[in-house]
Amino acid sequence: MTFNSNKLRFALTMSLRETRAAAGKFAFLVLAIAIGTGALTAVTGFNASVRYTLTREARSLMAADISVRLPLRPPQSDLDTLKALEAEGIETTRVTETVSMASRMASPSRRRRFARGR
């Protein structure tokens, strides 16, 4: 791709002519783009703030006295202890988080090669 300064100069000249002919419309366009960009930025920031707050305050929002995260399944003795506590009237909630990813293969022939391991 080559850069042609005449084409760029022509495009800038035409855009300046159009801007002079309808300055109000051009100002409205710039204002609309600025408002749209600001709105998208605000929504993204609000989303991040809500997500951070929910992550940080999850324990108090669930009204939990204790929260335990384990990378593996707990041993049977720990599960028995939880059952004994539940028998005394203590409520527990088990949450399982999974990480997954899905993708779409490009073509059926690639799918067959992938299934065969080639």
Image: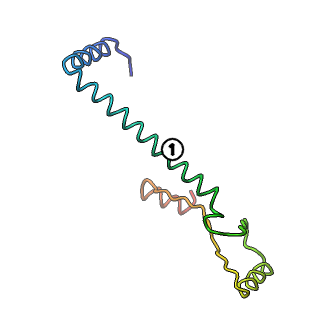
Figure check: 28 above or below 21: below
- Mark 1 highlights which residue? 45
- Coordinates of residue 41 in the picture (x, y in percent): 46, 40
- Crowding at dot 1, Cα within 10 Å, few <14 / some 14-19 / many 20+, comes out as few
Question: By what rule are the colours in the image chosen?
Answer: rainbow
- Tag 1's secondary structure? helix
- Coordinates of residue 25 in the picture (x, y in percent): 23, 26
Amino acid type indicated by mark 1: Gly
Question: On the picture, is 11 further left or further right than 81?
Answer: left
Question: On the picture, is 30 further left or further right than 58?
Answer: left
- Coordinates of residue 111 in the picture (x, y in percent): 47, 59
Figure check: 16 above or below 107: above
Query: Furthest-bottom residue in view?
Result: 87
Query: Furthest-right residue in view?
Result: 77
Quadrant occupied by the N terminus? top left
Query: Between 50 and 106, which is closer to the camera in this rendering?
Result: 50
Query: Between 69 and 91, which is closer to the camera in this rendering?
Result: 91
Figure check: 94 above or below 118: below
Question: On the picture, is 51 further left or further right than 88?
Answer: left
Kindly identify the residue that appears in the image at 56 percent across and 56 percent down: 118
Q: Identify the image quadrant of residue 11.
A: top left
Kindly identify the residue that appears in the image at 49 percent across and 56 percent down: 103
Q: Identify the image quadrant of residue 32.
A: top left
Total labels: the figure holds 1
Kindly identify the residue that appears in the image at 63 percent across and 58 percent down: 57
- Coordinates of residue 90 in the picture (x, y in percent): 70, 81
Query: Between 19 and 86, which is closer to the camera in this rendering?
Result: 86
